[in-house]
Every structure is written in C-alpha cells, then in structure tokens.
Image: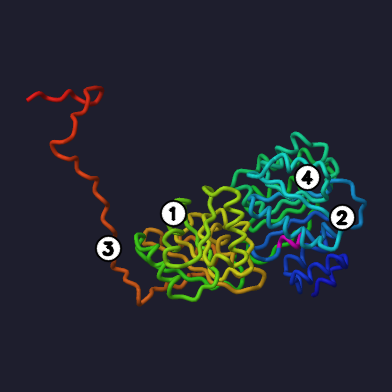
Amino acid sequence: MPFLALGLNPLLLKATKELGYTDPTPVQAGAIPPALEGRDVLATAQTGTGKTAAFLLPIMHRLLLQPRKGIRVVVISPTRELAEQIETAAKGFAAHTDLKSTLVVGGRPIGAQERAIQAGPDIVVATPGRLLDHMNSLGAKFAGAAVLVLDEADSMLDMGFLPDVKRIVKKLPGRRQTLLFSATMPPTIANLAAELLKNPVTVQIGKRTATAVGITQAAYPVPAHLKNALLRHLLRSTEMPSILVFTRTKHAARKLAKQVATDGFTVAELHSNRTPSQRSSAMAGFKKGDCQVMVATNIAARGLDVAHVTHVISTDVPDVPEDYVHRIGRTGRAGATGDAFILVSPDEEASLARIERQVGQRLPRVTLPDFDYQQLAPKPVAAPAPRGGGGRPKAAGRGNPPPRRR
C-alpha cells in the first residue's frame, strides 16, 4: 500500500517522497488511519520500524485542517538525542507547509527555549524534565495542546520519568488525542496506557521482545581481558562501513575510543561525560559518515536513528534482555539489513542465555582462527617501592607513630 492510499495531505506526501519514503511500514499502515480519525492509539513495535512517521504524519495532517492557535501538539521522548531526531523529522515533513516545531531539552539555553514557546509553535518536542520546567512557568501557553504523544514510553519508565510524565499530563487539557508508542509493553506502561488513553486502537507489530527482521546476529566467546583486542581485530579484518559499539560504562567507552582511534579509524564518543555540544557533534559526524565508528553507552540504545549503521557490536552482555533488543535495533532499520555481534566472556553466558530465551533463538558462536585467544591478561603494575634512606621520616600524628631515634 503506497502512502497515497492513506489519505494524507498532498504537501506531506510531497515531503515524504523527497525524504525517500515509498510504502508505509507495518506500524505506519496500522497507526496512521486511526490517528487521522482522531482516535487514541497504543502502538507496540520494535525499534527501527518507522514509529516517528507513524505519529507525526497523521498529527500534521490534522493540524493543516485547523486554524493556527499556538501550541497544539506535545511530543515527549526520553532522551535528548531522540527528541532532536523527532524534531528534525517534523521539520522535514513540514517542508512545504507553514507548520512550526520547536525543541525543548536539557543542556540548552533555557531563555531561547522560553522565547520559542512564547512564539507559539504548532509542535513542541521535549524531554520530560525540561518540559515540566517550562510548563511550571509558561503553563498557559500549553492550554490549547490537543494532542499528546509519548514516544519510547518503556524507556521513559526505565529512566524514572514516569512521575514527571504524570505531572505533565495533569497540566494538559483533559480533552485531547493521546498516542503512546513503545518498543515493549511492561505492566506499568500498560497501566499508564489504560489511565491516559480512551478507547484506543491497538497496533502491535511482531513479538514485543523480538528483534527487527533483517539483522544477522552472532556471539563471539572471548576471555574478558581480550574483548577490546578481539574488537580491534574484528574492525581491522572485516569490512564494516559504519559501526556502533556499545560498552557498559562511560569510562570503558572513552578508553576503547582512544584505542580504536590509534588503529586509524575515525571515532566518535557518545556517553554522559560528553557535553551537549560534543554529543550533538558526535551524532552529526556519525550521521554524515565522517566517523566510521561510534563508541557509546546505552544512551544510544534508543534515540539513535542513523540509516546507514551496518554493524552493532556489544562489548558486554546486558543484564536486561530488552537492552540488547534496543541496541541491535540501531541497525537493520526500516527494512534494511545489518549485523549484530556480541562479545561474551565465560561469566556472561548466563546473561546471554536469558537474551536468547527472550528473542527465541540461540545465537551462533563464532571464533576467529587468526586471533590468539591464549594471550595472558596483563599483570597489574606494582606500586613503586619507596626510595631507601633518602626520604624524610613521616611526621608523628594520628596513625603515624613517632620515628625511632637511633
């Protein structure tokens, strides 16, 4: 079914064609018709299936039929990166219309955001905390918001945003259209949907814990101390045009990024120790292809929408199986294909087994014949011994006995 058959405004159809959209994905085909009718929608679909267009296009179609009267739509997402991408998509779809959108996220000047809200854009795309700040001071500006979108609702729950979301909802008009999109549907999110949505149309695409179609997965058993070495070997010996590497911690990400850079790769970092401008620059460089490798923490498991990611490599096995599903969803997006590798040490096999049960398949184990798995772990560097005879005796005090006289 082409987009034309959905009955969208011709100006929006022109933009989708220019942006490379052809036929709607299943979640778009399922969610757009009821959203066009003004119905509430509860949609569950894997990452990379086109959820952003599934809510933006019908919302923007309905906005074009109504007189402009300030803020009419509020879209909430869990991360700054995802919010930026949604707002970029909104601008792209609105290219041939007079619809305006603005971005409200932390880490950016609050004064400029206040001025943008005062100007009355049609759509506000925001993260929960910063949006709540603005609603506390500029609540009247949101009195006409007739549509609320909660994107990646399960991630908002995981990140502890549920109380903020409920406070935001109380500040919005009671009569509104609500669209809730999520990759998974845990009981808490199902309860939130029951609380916020009125007679919703339910759209469920695939298993709630399934990985996207088109992703080839494999596990690489390796001793923990050789993970970085194996990863660097993989990068040097395998054709990988665009690689997203996940680490458990920001310190591991920083260390690995430096090591990979010494091998001649262009590398970007994405983790919480980077400033907002550094994170934006890293995202822009990776999207444009200026950086071949992005090393990131789970901050990129959601909200990183880069069409050309060919490989996702996890250097650790996530404790929560859903985190693995979200990580590998960064490749194979919108019908494309991709590869997902996970490096697993012996003590992580139990966690990997939980992931395999969740996704319903056993990942093939791969060992590389040209890699030395017998390398010993580096010995810890001993602390330098104190120089004999030349040092001054420690002063007497608590914990230090007075020096003996000879």
Task: Identify the amino acid type marked 4.
Answer: Ala
Q: Main secondary structure of the magenta part?
A: helix
Residue 40, quarter of picture: bottom right
341 relative to 200 in the view: left or right: left
* Residue designated by label 3: 376
Which element type, helix, strand or loop, lies under badge 2? Answer: helix
* Residue designated by label 4: 116
Tell me if mark 2 has few (under 14), some (14-19) or many (20+) residues whose alpha carbon lies within 10 angstroms of its own. some
- Between discs 3 and 4, the one toward the N terminus: 4
Tell me if mark 1 has few (under 14), some (14-19) or many (20+) residues whose alpha carbon lies within 10 angstroms of its own. some
Task: Please state the horizontal and vertical placement of residue 376, each as a whole percent of the image.
Answer: 27, 63
Q: Tell me, for residue 208, which label it has, or none.
A: none
- Between discs 1 and 4, the one toward the N terminus: 4
* Residue designated by label 1: 252
129 relative to 201 in the view: left or right: left
Mark 1 or 4: the one toward you: 4
Which element type, helix, strand or loop, lies under badge 1? Answer: helix
Q: Residue at x 34, y 60 (%)?
A: 225
Q: Is residue 370 magenta?
A: no
- Which residues, given as a range, are shown in magenta? 51-55
Q: Residue at x 27, y 52 (%)?
A: 380
* Residue designated by label 2: 63
